Amino acid sequence: MAAAPPSRRQLQAASTHEQLLGAAREVFEARGYAGTTVGAITSVANTAHGTFYLYFRNKEDAFGCVMAAVTAELYEQAGARWAPGDPRVAIESSIRGFLDVFVAHRGLWRCLLEGSFANPVIEAMWLEIRERFVARIERNLRVLAEVGGVRPMDPAMTANALGAMVEWAATTQFVLATPSVAGATFDDCVRTLTDLWFHAVHVDARPSVVRTVPAVRATAGEAERT
């Protein structure tokens, strides 16, 4: 038996929810976590203050819904589209997808970072978002390890390190605007992260040979090699 179509009331409720969610995203991106209030959200949404509480418990709940929607988009766009025999293409595709969504919502990532250091609920939200991505990286690494596609490594630690590299490179370049990379473009970032990820994972499986370089120290105006 086919489900009954939604009633006018249900359609109106869904429309109001989306209106509030869109307003919350706009305010959080513009004002940050601390600067966002329920009043500011309802003002942008052009709804009554009490209407907000028909759909969200509080500001934290609204932020959680905003981040859930953005994270779903991020997770989908960052999904690796594997090219047989060419892991570098897959890595670049995944990183580019992640950064596309990250940059589009950079204000929300600043908001998430700000809130996580002041609110345990937001901190837990951030860790949960990270864990989802790190777990997927780990799964991919384990699959590659089974077929000898990567060098020996601890998949969990490597996944966490690679995820952090992309996340913090994006944060420092596109959210915090670190002066040292002020001239770098989006494509520069994608290429650099792809290169680092590829060479960290897809290298000759033989143990690396570490060459000892003599230390150099300055003494009485001259360099003395030891």
Image: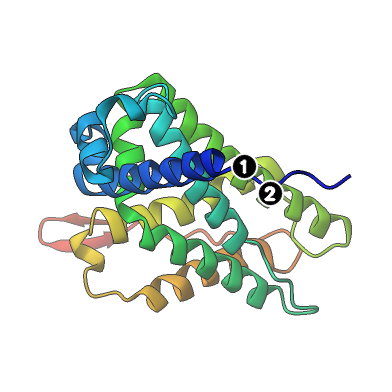
Q: Name the residue under label 1.
A: 132
The quarter of the picture where the N terminus appears is top right
Amino acid type of the residue that numbered disc 1 sits on in the rendered structure: Arg
The residue sitting at 29% across, 49% down in the picture is: 26
Q: Residue 217 carries which label?
A: none
Along the viewing direction, whichever of 108 and 206 lies nearer the viewer? 108
Q: Distance between the residues labelled 1 and 2?
A: 6 Å
**10 Å crowding of disc 2: few (<14), some (14-19), many (20+):** some
In which quarter of the view is residue 144 placed? bottom right
- Looking at the image, residue 74 sits to the left or right of residue 159; the answer is left
Q: Report whether residue 154 is seen.
A: no
Q: Residue furthest left?
A: 221
Q: Which mark is residue 136?
A: 2
Q: Report whether residue 47 is seen.
A: yes
The residue sitting at 64% across, 77% down in the picture is: 89
The residue sitting at 70% across, 71% down in the picture is: 81
Label 1 with label 2: CB-CB less than 8 Å: yes
Q: In this view, does 138 lie above or below 87?
A: above
The quarter of the picture where the C terminus appears is bottom left
Q: Is residue 113 above or below residue 151?
A: above
For mark 1, give the secondary structure. Answer: helix
Along the viewing direction, whichever of 124 and 88 lies nearer the viewer? 124
Name the spot of residue 66 as percent of width and height, x first: 43, 42
Name the spot of residue 160 as percent of width and height, x first: 58, 44
- Looking at the image, residue 47 sits to the left or right of residue 219; the answer is right
- Looking at the image, residue 62 sits to the left or right of residue 40; the answer is right
Q: What colour scheme was applied to this rendering of the protein?
A: rainbow
For mark 2, give the secondary structure. Answer: helix
